[in-house]
Image: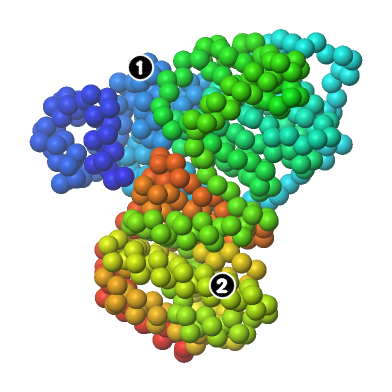
Amino acid sequence: MYFNEKLDTLMRVQGVSNSRLAKALSVDPSLVSRWRTGDRKPANKNYIERISDYFATQAKMDYQKSALFEIMGLGFNKNEARKYSISDLLYSWLSNEASPDTQLIEGFFSKLENHKKTNTPLSEINTSFPSDTQPSVEVLYGTEGKREGVIRFLCTVAAQTKPCTMLLYSDENMDWLTEDKSFYIKWGALLMDVIRKGHKIKIIHTINRELSEMLSAIERWLPLYLTGAIEPYYYPKYREHIFRRTMFIAPGVIALTSNALSEHSNEAEQFLYTDTKIINGLTDEFNTYLGMCRPLMRIFTGSSISGFNNLQIEFEEQSGSCISLSDMLSFLTMPEPLLIRLLRKCNADKSQKENVLSMHRSRFEVFVSNIEHNNYTEIVTLPSMSEISDNKISIKPNDLLSNITLSYTPQDYCEHIENIIDMINKYNNFNFLISSKKPAKNIFLTAKAEVGAIVVKNDIPPIVFAFNQQNMTNSFIIYLDDIIREIPEKGRNKKHVIKGLQEHKQLTLN
């Protein structure tokens, strides 16, 4: 979002007219109008400071402050919010041309890029609880009661010899999970142990939470997602959450529930059930709700990664303009004769090579069909000359997940560049943009409005997040649009791009 879009949003949401803001700033209302339309920008940062101060002083009630935080794409917790100056946050937001979604997604990519799998040995954690016969229904109180109930729930599931699929849902504030670090570590270790023992999870996420909270949840669950044992869902319709509900169910084994007014959830009663009839009733209730939900995202990793290529073709078959981002040239833009030569040289069996070639042909056929009516924009950071070896360049395109690593010489690399130039000239709707901003390493992002977004971390092990929830898809598209806007206008001109590619090719050969 640009400054004018942010100011317009602030004024519309807070019900502030041009004349009212102009009076507060001692300027003409026509100047405020031009700021809102983008015809003019504030002449200096002093105006942005005064605008920030004005809107901060207007937000006296918690709901007004919450609205400002939501506009900026930040999660609102009134206790945490007291630590920050709303005026400073507004100034930073209004001054920064990158959208809050862009900042959040860059943070998500950074954590995904630097993710290291860590396991806390269960031997270091006391997971014991009273072993005498428990009543069929227990009541536990407050945040500590919820934590105790969750630990007992997981310990009970871990003790089962027959794997089950746990059913999880909560629209409560997640502070009970994250505020106590020792509990959070214990919870994570237990949940990972439960998954290692063959248990799986179906979880319904609350998607009307801010993007920051959604991405934070994905980051927290990243080690668990890597196991491929989690199926995430969301309810597609808006719900006003006056009461907060939590349901942790291991069908036929144990269940933990709570239900409380949102402002009272820290003191709420938690009910821990071992009565089979009650658990069956709760399981039916959860499954009825699940039937109204949609998959939030599909996750591919480990043995399931082979299914990604089929998903990618399904994604590309959907009509719509597409934007992709990568730190290397794509598999899609590689010319087929070059691919055939490279496959002959690599150490892969015949069936693997045939599968890769078949995948390339299928994807290119879909590309040609779509490019007639839709734009396809590929944003790539080209390697520096120091990164290009004199002998050979090892590549593993981020949009091709396979065990095959291809190697091509500088001449092969230049053939790939030449094919991209040919595609730019041949297809009016194909745009190739060179970005100087280095994206996260080995991460490929592609997104289509109304279709979804795919995030690939092409590492060992690789992992794919395929999102189809509209708000999250839109956030990724905003992120990609911000990157495009950062490229100078001249750099988006096809003739200029072709000239840059030709110069890059010449430097490579020299």
Which residue is depicted at the point 14% across and 37% down?
33
Report, in whole angstroms, how far the alpha carbon at label 2 lies from the one at label 1.
60 Å
Residue lying at the far bottom of the rendered structure: 510
Label 2 is placed on what type of residue? Val
Q: Quadrant of residue 17?
A: top left
Q: Name the foreground residue: 449 vs 222.
A: 449
Query: Across the whole image, how many numbered discs are drawn on residues?
Result: 2
Q: Which of the two labelled residues, at mark 2 and mark 1, occupies the earlier sequence position?
A: 1
Looking at the rendered structure, the kind of residue marked 1 is: Lys
- Secondary structure of the residue carrying numbered label 2: helix
Where is residue 318 drawn, in percent x and y? 39, 56
Quick check: 351 left or right of 57? right
Q: Going 41% across and 29% down the picture, which residue do you hit?
A: 237
Can the viewer see residue 476 in this picture? no
Q: Is residue 217 above or below residue 19?
A: below
Colour basis? rainbow
Q: Which residue is mark 1?
A: 60
Q: List x then y, in percent, for residue 337.
A: 48, 84
Is residue 304 placed above or below 258 in the rendered structure? Answer: below
User: What quarter of the picture does the N terminus occupy?
Assistant: top left
Please name whichever residue, 23 or 297, is drawn nearer the observer in this view of the structure. Answer: 297
Tell me which corner region of the image, top left, top right, bottom left or bottom right, holds residue 7.
Answer: top left
Is residue 423 found left or right of 109 in the rendered image?
Answer: left
Query: What secondary structure is found at the residue carrying circle 1?
Result: loop
Give how far across and how far down residue 77 sits, in percent.
Answer: 49, 24
Residue 180 x, y percent position in the rendering: 68, 26
Circle 2 Cα neighbour tier, 10 Å, few/some/many (<14 / 14–19 / ≥20): many
On the image, which quarter does residue 315 sit in?
bottom left
Whether label 2 touches label 1, CB < 8 Å: no
Q: In the rendered view, tell whether residue 65 sits above or below residue 321.
A: above
**In the image, what residue occupies the spot 58% across and 48% down?**
299
Q: According to the image, label 2 marks what residue?
A: 356
